[in-house]
Amino acid sequence: MLFGNVNKLSLVKYVNPSFVTWIDEAMALAAEKEDGRYELSGDGVFVLLMSPETEGFAKRKAEIHKQHLDIQILLDGEEQIGYTHELAEEALALTELENDVAFFEQASNEQMVKLGKGDFAVFYPDEVHRPLCAVAEPRQVRKAVVKIPVSAL
């Protein structure tokens, strides 16, 4: 997992330069487009703009992807995202996932990171993450989730 802020991308010096390009493209689209799916530069790279509501930790499921990286950008509001590098045996056994996502109720040694406006987190394949957890009370947020196929890197 990589954590940063879109207004301080110069501090993330050693990240793949394409990540910065896709973050910039996603931010430009978010400023002018409604929620939906939009293609970005790069083979198969796209962004999902959304306005979901956060929920209590117990209501959210952890997830993994096998073929995509996520760059989860919080455009407005606040949320917590759970993450861990410890995969359950059931997750390790999975090779192909329908829509490239598998959900889990439990995750071992899960840590939380709090995102505010402009913060982003990058999750690589097989990195367990639990997005949209409420910080205090559930509330609506606006997010951009950049989906990057591993083949685009």
Image: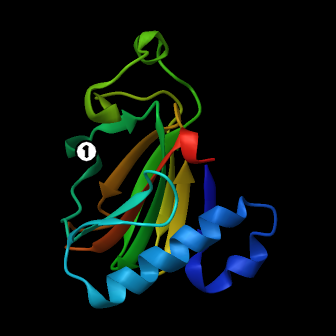
Residue 57 in percent (x, y) is at 29, 48
Residue 72 visible in image: yes
The crowding category of the residue bearing disc 1, from other C-alpha atoms within 10 Å (few below 14, some 14 to 19, many at least 20), is: some
For residue 55, side relative to residue 108 (left or right): left
Residue 99 in percent (x, y) is at 27, 34
On screen, 64 above or below 45?
A: above
Q: Going 59% across and 72% down the picture, which residue do you hit?
A: 21
For residue 17, side relative to residue 133 (left or right): right
Residue 77 in percent (x, y) is at 33, 79
Q: Which residue is mark 1?
A: 60
Q: Nearer the viewer, residue 3 or 65?
A: 65
Report which quarter residue 6 is drawn in. Answer: bottom right
For residue 15, side relative to residue 7 (left or right): right
Name the amino acid type tagged 1. Answer: Arg
On screen, 86 above or below 134?
A: above
Q: Nearer the viewer, residue 63 or 138?
A: 63
Q: Going 49% across and 15% down the picture, which residue do you hit?
A: 92
